[in-house]
Amino acid sequence: MNDVSYDDLFLEPPINFSMVDDGIFRSGFPQPSNFPFLETHRLRSVIYLCPEPYPEENLEFIRSQDIQLFQFGIEGKKEPCVCNVPIDTILEALKVLIDVRNHPVLIHCKRGKHRTGCLVGCLRRFQNWCLSSVFEEYQRFAGAKSRTTDLRFIEAFDVNCLREWVCSVGYQSQGYAHSGQRRWLYKEENLQKQTWSNRIEDGKPNAA
């Protein structure tokens, strides 16, 4: 007997919801109607990229699910303007994002386009994606509202800052049999249970 309820067939994801990598998701701002859908992903963390306070109904949801909230307030501005994405804020958000103890994790801003796109774009740089593929992914979510300032920010992002931090806290690169992937593992953790992302050597797709 199938125990899936009728309501389970109509779970509604947040706008622009998508999987970024194993245990990493992105979206626009979750609405209460999206909460049942998010429950199915058993999130441990939410990375919120807006400066405004998190709504009380969203706070109640994450408390009920024992989800940790990481807020990195990035102002949302329209072009034309100088790039308003703080490099230090993105770097701190990436440190949370690549820590697999925070996974499954949802990244979101208002619409899941620009601020979320910048963070994911910098993650892809860390994973050694070629720039054209990074831009294509950003533009797929931003659509007609793609911002050249965001693309310039992603292109200029110095991944060595994050790699130096990764090395300084004692991570090591560890290959996985059969998968062809490499992930970051913390030296003092059980390597079979505690993994640290991301795919920076054999990630997809690599530059030629």
Image: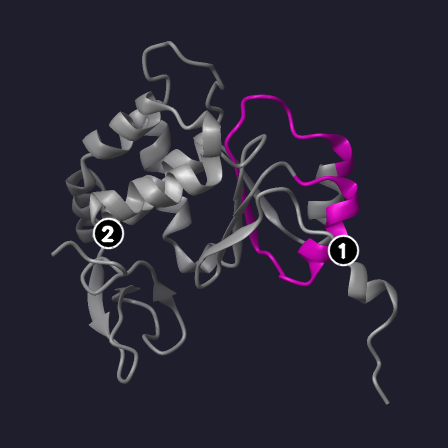
Q: Position of residue 142 (x, y in %)?
A: 46, 34
Q: CA distance from mark 1 to mark 2?
A: 33 Å
Outermost front residue:
144
Q: Residues within 10 Å of mark 1 (few under 14, many from 20)?
A: some
Residues tagged 1 and 2 counted as in contact (Cβ below 8 A): no
Which numbered mark, 1 or 2, is in the foreground of this view? 2
What is the three-letter code of the residue carrying label 2?
Answer: Trp
Q: Position of residue 181 (x, y in %)?
A: 26, 71
Mark carried by residue 1 = none
Quadrant position of residue 54 = top right
Circle 2 — which element? loop
Q: Check residue 153 for magenta coloring.
A: no
Q: Which image quarter is the N terminus in? A: bottom right
Q: Is residue 39 above or below residue 60?
A: below
Quadrant position of residue 187 = bottom left
Q: Is residue 95 above or below residue 43?
A: above
Number of labels in the image equals 2
Outermost bottom residue:
1
Report the residue at 18% width, 52% height from top: 167
Q: Earlier in the sequence, mark 1 or mark 2?
A: 1
User: Which residue in the structure is indicated by mark 1?
Assistant: 36
Q: Check residue 39 for magenta coloring.
A: yes
What is the three-letter code of the residue carrying label 1?
Answer: Pro
Q: Which image quarter is the C terminus in? A: bottom left
Circle 1 — which element? helix
Q: Position of residue 155 (x, y in %)?
A: 22, 33
Viewer-closest of 23 and 162: 23
User: Which residue in the structure is indicated by mark 2?
Assistant: 129
Residue 93 visible within the image: no
Q: Is residue 178 above or below residue 130?
A: below
Q: Residues within 10 Å of mark 2 (few under 14, many from 20)?
A: many
